Image (cartoon, grey):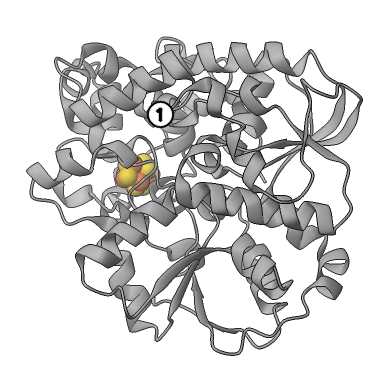
Amino acid sequence: MESDMNLCEVSLKNLFDTEEGKRVLSCIQCGVCRGTCPHGFAMQYPPRKIIGLLKAGMIEKVISSPDMLLCISCYSCKNKCPRKIQLTNMLLPLVKEKVFENLGEVPPELQKALENTFRYGNPLGESPKKRQEWVKEAGVPIRILSQDKSPADILWWVECYSSYHPRGIETAIATAKILNAMKLDFAILGNEEVCAGECARLVGETGLFDTMREKNLKTFKKYTFNRIVTSGVHAYDALAFKYPCSGFHYPVEQITPFLAHHIQLLKPLLKKRLDDYVVTYHDSCVLGRHNGFYEEPRTLLSAIPGLKLVEMAHNRENGLCCGGGGGGMWLDTYYKMMGLERLSEKRVKEAVASGADVIAVSCHYEIPRFEDAIKVMGYDQRIIVRDVVELLTESMGG
Ligand code: SF4
Ligand code: SF4
């Protein structure tokens, strides 16, 4: 796994004075970035052009255009770039920050999600006082640090969608059951947790990201814990790579790789056979391409007795993006107006073609995205979406 610490101080102004900036200058204009980009065919300014304009001192052209809203931070260009230029995690966010400052009009759905994050601490616009409400439905003990301040080994970062969205709550409950069954010492922040802010950062709203980070860092200081396990993949990236820029120092793991790393503890609990399930795993861009966790989710699924795992045509590093990263979660209508195919629908088609009847995911954006796509495409009776933690809990018999 790479560290982004050396990217903390990079800005568009000092870009070419930094090591990473010098790497940008090594671009050979090959166009691989555009070719691999899910929206590359529709982009006026793919990474190749951005770099060309930067070198020519003409970045204003990019900054005055909304074109960068087409980037859904899928990490494909970064991974395929032959010069290993830190595109998705360094150059593109720097450009997007400027684009966002200059955007005449922010697409309404995105504007609402960002406003909600600022006002309520979550993009769904739910009350911050209800963030821990789901705990009442869990049926297993979940310690909330504000109610019991004693030190915890693991701070479980629940994340916004798992705290509020009905399907997200189901995954939160599944996770709580697993952590309890594994007899781990964990606690949550409950109503004190606010959005980690990663998607705001990746769409260019860095001011909002900074606000969220500040709030969370202040809350962390109130409690004693050893490490963080987060349900959210975007929260994972924020905590693992961007919070350390502000002095945050806790080890962080996302729940899927975390559980895979504890497979010996988990395996004896997986007693129920899931013989009827043919499952295909959708690699989230963040866990997969950005962090290289390709085998961990598959290790967990393969540990479930009876479950048959099949692969989609595009998997692991070549997996197709669901379209929800980098603000894309709230840009579906905007993309539709541009006549673009929904990437979640494209992915569902591949999942169906694989012969699977379950799409397994690790990111909470993917459940509503794929379930919606399945409904729109009329595949309701053909395929379902389950988080890996839900399949694990089912095999645990609960
Ligand atoms: S893939 Fe890399 S080297 Fe090739 S044009 Fe894009 S940024 Fe430049
Ligand atoms: S991160 Fe993905 S969506 Fe963004 S420019 Fe690169 S390939 Fe395209």
Could you tell me which residue is drawn at 54 percent across and 89 percent down? 276
Quadrant for ligand 2 reads top left
> In the rendered view, does 66 fall on the left or right side of 381?
left
Instruction: Estimate the x, y position of residue 173 in percent, counting from the top left.
Output: 64, 51
The residue singled out by tag 1 in the image is 123
Q: Nearer the viewer, residue 207 or 38?
A: 207
Vertical arrangement, residue 339 with respect to residue 219, above or below: below
User: On the rendered image, what quadrant is the C terminus found in?
Assistant: bottom right
Residue 28 in view:
no
Please tell me which residue is depicted at 69% across the width and 69% down the height of the picture: 300
**x, y (%) of residue 185?**
88, 42
In the image, 297: left or right of 202?
right
Q: Secondary structure at mark 1?
A: loop
Residue 133 position in % (x across, y down): 59, 34
Amino acid on which the number 1 mark rests in the picture? Pro
Number of marks present in the image shown: 1
Question: Taking 377 as reference, is 251 above or below it?
Answer: above
